[in-house]
């Protein structure tokens, strides 16, 4: 098919790029045969690229330009985002209060009411499946004092998002959300003095904590209308593929995929949240740790689904770096998705985080 170079001002959404496009970058910012979107046009302008080669489809001379739908202004988009986050935050806080009462009841011997748990968690699941950027707000909603209750709810929500990303049908996505929420229900049977200890646990206390998957399984094993695979996943959510987990030190081949989904969600939220004895970390930094230092412990496909949820952000997403500078994402490098090209707000300078590893994205700015 014939190709021709077209000026940036004459490019239209839907045109096909005829060759890889570089912009003083190690990897292409656009690959050959990419169908142009509004985001791609934004990238090209940001890199001051004047023209690019595109494929002609034989009808370009005849085709009349179709008026693109008018885009919402950045101000309106920002306002809508704040409203969405505020509504979610209000509902989320209500759920935390309700869950806390339920959790304390379990500690006193009450049975799990699966219908009540489902009714409580599913409205939040619907929101996070519609807008995955809410994941970035979960650690800001949490606090060290009530960490455990926040952790249960957030683990359920992140598990659902991962399951959806992996392509599971809706029924399983909703079930894994409930399973993730109930994974730590056995912690209700751990003495309060251990659960709320402000210093790192000693070995005896840690051994007590390690019993909670057993207690969780005991509490859910007779719950009706709850898939057996999910009960197994709850029991296995602290198992690791290299045998370093607990309670049975299972290895790859013995740990279910659903157990791995909850395990990755549990680890991600725990590391990105403030706790009584540990500060929270950047979601991007946590993903790098899970991929590098925790390599071999988690299923690669499950980890990649989390990477896609967190790191594959739209071009133009506002971020803050670990050195407190702000900017926006210009290009996602598929070989280092947690370290994209960033355009600094203060100077307009474009930096490649995959080359400059002295700092990283500390947070995504979702509500400003």
Image (cartoon, rainbow, N blue to C red):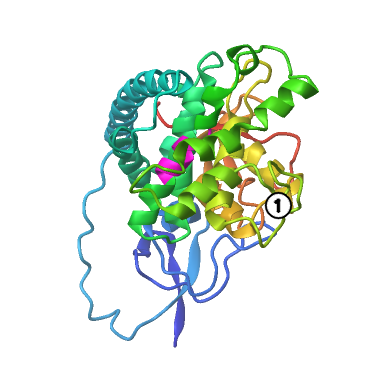
- Name the one closer to the observer, 294 or 240: 240
Q: Residue 341 location, x and y as percent?
A: 60, 47
- Name the one closer to the observer, 67 or 115: 115
- Name the one closer to the observer, 183 or 367: 183
At x 45%, y 78%, the residue is 4
Q: Residue 252 location, x and y as percent?
A: 69, 59
At x 60%, y 32%, the residue is 212
Give neighbour class at mark 1: few <14, some 14-19, many 20+ (Cα, 10 Å): some
In this rendering, is residue 232 above or below 367?
below
- Residue 48 seen by the camera: no
Name the residue carrying label 1: 250
In this rendering, would 94 be left or right of 105? left
Q: Residue 251 location, x and y as percent?
A: 72, 55
In this rendering, would 47 be left or right of 125? right
At x 38%, y 23%, the residue is 102
Start-end of magenta stretch: 177-184
SS assignment for the magenta stretch, majority? helix
Placement of the C terminus among the 4 image quadrants: top left
Placement of the N terminus among the 4 image quadrants: bottom left
- Name the one closer to the observer, 6 or 273: 273
Please, which residue is most extreme toward the right here?
A: 203
Q: Residue 283 location, x and y as percent?
A: 59, 36
In this rendering, is residue 106 above or below 306?
above
At x 38%, y 64%, the residue is 11
Mark 1 lies on a secondary structure that is loop
In this rendering, would 300 be left or right of 355? left
Residue 99, quarter of picture: top left
In this rendering, would 193 be left or right of 148? right
Magenta span includes 73: no
């Amino acid at each position: 098919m014939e190709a021709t170079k077209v000026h940036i001002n004459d490019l239209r959404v839907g045109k096909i790029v005829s060759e890889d496009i570089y912009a003083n970058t190690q990897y292409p910012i656009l690959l050959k045969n990419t169908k142009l979107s509004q985001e791609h046009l934004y990238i090209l302008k940001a890199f001051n690229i004047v023209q690019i080669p595109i494929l002609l489809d034989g009808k370009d001379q005849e085709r009349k330009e179709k008026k693109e739908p008018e885009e919402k202004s950045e101000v309106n988009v920002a306002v809508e985002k704040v409203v969405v986050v505020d509504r979610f935050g209000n509902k989320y806080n209500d759920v935390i209060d309700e869950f806390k009462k339920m959790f304390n009841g379990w500690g006193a011997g009450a049975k799990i009411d699966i219908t009540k748990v489902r009714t409580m968690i599913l409205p939040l699941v619907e929101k996070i499946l519609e807008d995955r950027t809410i994941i970035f707000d979960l650690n800001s909603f949490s606090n060290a004092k009530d960490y455990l209750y926040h952790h249960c709810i957030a683990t359920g929500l992140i598990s659902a998002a991962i399951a959806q990303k992996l392509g599971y049908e809706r029924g399983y996505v909703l079930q894994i959300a409930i399973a993730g929420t109930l994974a730590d229900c056995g912690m209700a049977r751990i003495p309060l003095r251990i659960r709320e200890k402000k210093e790192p646990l000693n070995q005896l206390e840690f051994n007590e904590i390690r019993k909670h998957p057993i207690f969780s399984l005991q509490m859910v094993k007779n719950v009706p209308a709850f898939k057996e695979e999910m009960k197994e996943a709850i029991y296995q959510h602290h198992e690791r593929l290299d045998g370093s987990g607990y309670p049975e030190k299972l290895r790859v081949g013995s740990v279910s995929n659903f157990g791995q989904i909850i395990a990755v969600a549990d680890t991600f939220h725990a590391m990105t949240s403030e706790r009584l004895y540990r500060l929270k970390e950047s979601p991007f930094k946590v993903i790098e740790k899970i991929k590098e230092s925790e390599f071999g412990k988690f299923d690669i496909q499950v980890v990649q689904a989390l990477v896609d949820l967190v790191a594959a952000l739209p071009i133009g997403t506002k971020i803050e770096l670990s050195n407190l500078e702000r900017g926006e994402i210009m290009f996602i490098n598929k070989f280092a998705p947690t370290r994209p090209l960033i355009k600094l707000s203060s100077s307009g300078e474009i930096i490649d985080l995959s080359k400059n590893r002295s700092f990283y994205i500390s947070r995504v700015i979702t509500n400003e």
